[in-house]
Image: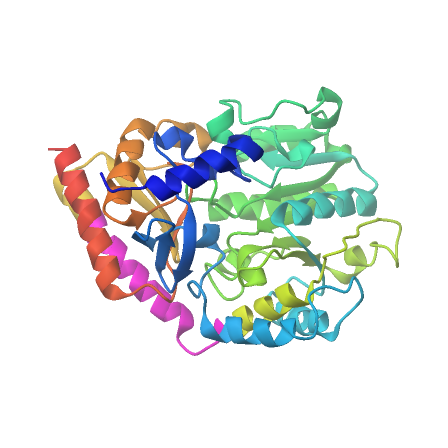
Amino acid sequence: MSNRSRSEQIYQKLCEVIPGGVNSPVRSCSSMGQLPMVIDHAYQDTLVDVDGKKYIDFCGSWGALIHGHAHPVILKAVQERMQKGTSFGITTSIEGELAQEVVKLIDSIEKVRFVSSGTEATMSVARLARGYTGKELLVKFIGNYHGHADFFLVQAGSGVLEVSPTASSAGIPSEIVKHTLCLPYNDIEACRKVFQHPNYRKRIAAVILEPIAGNMGVVPATKEFMQFLRQETQEMGALLILDEVITGFRVSQKGAQHLYSVKPDLTCLGKIVGGGFPAAAFGGRKDIMNHLAPLGPVYQAGTLSGNPLAMEAGLQSLKLLQQPQFYENLQHKTDFFIKPIEEQILQKKWPACIQQVGSMFTLFFGKKEVTNLKEALEADSALFARFFRDMFEQGIYVPPSQHEAWFISQAHEEKNLEKARNAVLKFMEEAYS
C-alpha cells in the first residue's frame, strides 16, 4: 500500500469540523472501505493528491470537465475576467453571451436562466412547472437523481443510495413528498396506468427524468419510453422536463434530447455549462420562462446566479466543444478504452457489462444488462469496492460507487487510457478466473 500519511492527517482534521470530513457524501469513499482522496492539484487527465501521488481521472468532477483539468484557454479567460472583480450581484454582459450560446445549441431552449448548482436548477424548474400549469403533482422515476431538494429525494439515485436503501433521506416530512409520484423507469405500462388514473391525470404539473440516467450507473431511457412520455404529457396538459445536468453537452453538442429526437418543454443543465465552476441553468419555451419574476409570478433568485467568473468559464467551455471533430475525437478515445474490455467480456463470458452513451459509461459487475434501479442494485457492489481499491492503488481514480458514471475527456492521453484499460482487464481476469 502506498504511503498516504499526509492525506490521512488532513482528513482527520477535516472530520473535526466538517461532518464526515466531506461536503458531499460520496466523496467519503465509506462504502469503498478506504480513506478518501485529498486533492492538491490536477492537470489534463491527471489528479495529484496531497501526498504527491498521481491518478488517471475518470471522474472529471462528476462529468463537468469534458476538456480536462486546468484547460489553459478556460484558465486564461477566467483570470482576465477576475481582474474586473469576482462578484457583483448585478447584471453583466457575459451572462448574455453564455445565454446566447445555450439558446443556439439546445434547440428546445428559447430562454434560459442561470443558477449555481444542478439542485438549484431542478428545484427552480419544478416550481416553474407548477406555477405555469397551476397543478401540484410532479412525476419522477425510480433511480433518477435530481439533486437534494426535499420533494426529489424519493427513490433517487446517486450518493443517496449509499445512505439509505430506500434512496430517501431523514428530515423530509411526508406532506412534502406526497406531491411527488415516483414511477418505474422505462416501464411504459406502469406509467400509463398512473397517467390514466382519474385521481392523478388532471393534477400532474410535470414529468421530469434523466434521459440517460447517470446516477444509478449509465442507464438510458428507451426511445419508446421517451416518445411515450412526450405524447402523454402533451395530452395531459403537463410539461416534460429533461434533467440534462449530466448529459447536456456531454453526449452530443445538442444534448441527449437531440439523440432521442424529443423536444422537452423545459431542460436543466449543469456540469459542462459551468466549465468547472459552480454554475447550472434551466431553460425552455418562452411562454413558460416568462412566468419567472420579474415578468411573472414564479419567484427565483440567487446572489451568485450568473456569477461572471462562472459565466466566463462556461462560455469558453461551450466554445471549445464547438471545434471541428470535437465529439468524433472524444468518441474515438472512449472506444479505444471501452471496446477491448467489451470484447473480453463477450469472449470470456464474464458476468459483467459496460453501458455507455458517448463519453459516459459504467462498468457493472455481476449484470449483463441494466435497465432500471432494481437491476442496478443487483450488481456486485462488494466486487466493485475491491475493484475500486485495486485501481486506486495503481493510480487510477474511478467514481467511488458502483452506481455512478465514468467520464472521458478530450484531455485523456492514449497512453493513460491504455494503462487503465489493461489494469481493468487484469483485475477482471483474476476476479473471474
Residue 299 located left or right of residue 424: right
Residue 287 placement: quadrant: bottom right
Give the side of residue 246 with respect to residue 138, left or right. Answer: left
Q: Residue at x 54, y 38 (%)?
A: 144
Q: Nearer the viewer, residue 290 or 225?
A: 290
> Number of marks in the image?
0
Magenta extent? 320-342
- Residue nearer the viewer, 217 or 234: 217
Q: As displayed, is residue 20 above or below residue 293? A: above
Q: Looking at the image, which residue is at 72% across and 22% down?
A: 173
Residue 197's place in the image compared with 362, above or below, is above
Q: Is residue 424 left or right of residue 7?
A: left
Q: Position of residue 40 (x, y in %)?
A: 42, 54
Which one is in front, 399 or 357?
399
Image height of 62 relative to 318, above or below: above
Where does the image place residue 342, in percent across and percent down from the top left?
23, 48
Is residue 158 visible to us here?
no
